[in-house]
Image (cartoon, helix red, strand yellow):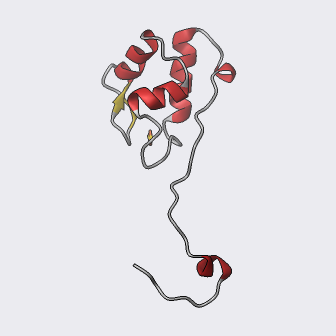
Amino acid sequence: MTEDTIICRCEDVTYGQVVEAIEQGFTTTEEMKRMLRCGMGACQGRTCGRLIAQIIAAKTGTSLSQVPLPTSRPPAAPTELAILAGTPHEETS
Ligand code: FES
């Protein structure tokens, strides 16, 4: 990987940015999320989360199992109860 290698394609975070954050002392995936927004894009970290954990493990000399993976929250949108119940309903805007 080079400094410019994209690690989080949703948020355009590069390998160099991740390494710089680790050097500043941010060594968890949650801290990376807050610092660089990696893991907060459309895929919610499904693409980059494990990769960032691997970089943290390599740069801090710990094993991957000691780096907790980021929590994920699927995108949510309000849903009418009628839709969940499967009953006829009127569309609201
Ligand atoms: S690749 Fe990082 S949030 Fe999608």
Quarter-of-image position of residue 16: top left
Q: Is residue 32 visible?
A: yes
Residue at figure coordinates x 36%, y 39% from the top left? 11
Q: Is residue 3 left or right of residue 33?
A: left
Indicate the quadrant of ligand 1 in the picture: top left
Where is residue 64 shown, x and y percent of the image? 64, 21
In depth, the one of 45 and 58 nearer the eye is 45
Q: Is residue 1 visible?
A: no
Residue at figure coordinates x 53%, y 18% from the top left? 56
* Numbered circles on residues, count: 0
Rendered view: 60 above or below 39: above
Q: Is residue 68 left or right of residue 17?
A: right
In depth, the one of 30 and 20 nearer the eye is 30
Rendered view: 92 above or below 40: below
Q: Is residue 61 left or right of residue 45?
A: right
Residue at figure coordinates x 62%, y 76% from the top left? 81
Where is residue 69 shown, x and y percent of the image? 61, 31
The quarter of the image holding the C terminus is bottom left
The quarter of the image holding the N terminus is top left
Where is residue 40 shown, x and y percent of the image? 45, 41
In depth, the one of 13 and 93 nearer the eye is 93
Quarter-of-image position of residue 17: top left
Residue at figure coordinates x 54%, y 27% from the top left? 29
Quarter-of-image position of residue 2: top left
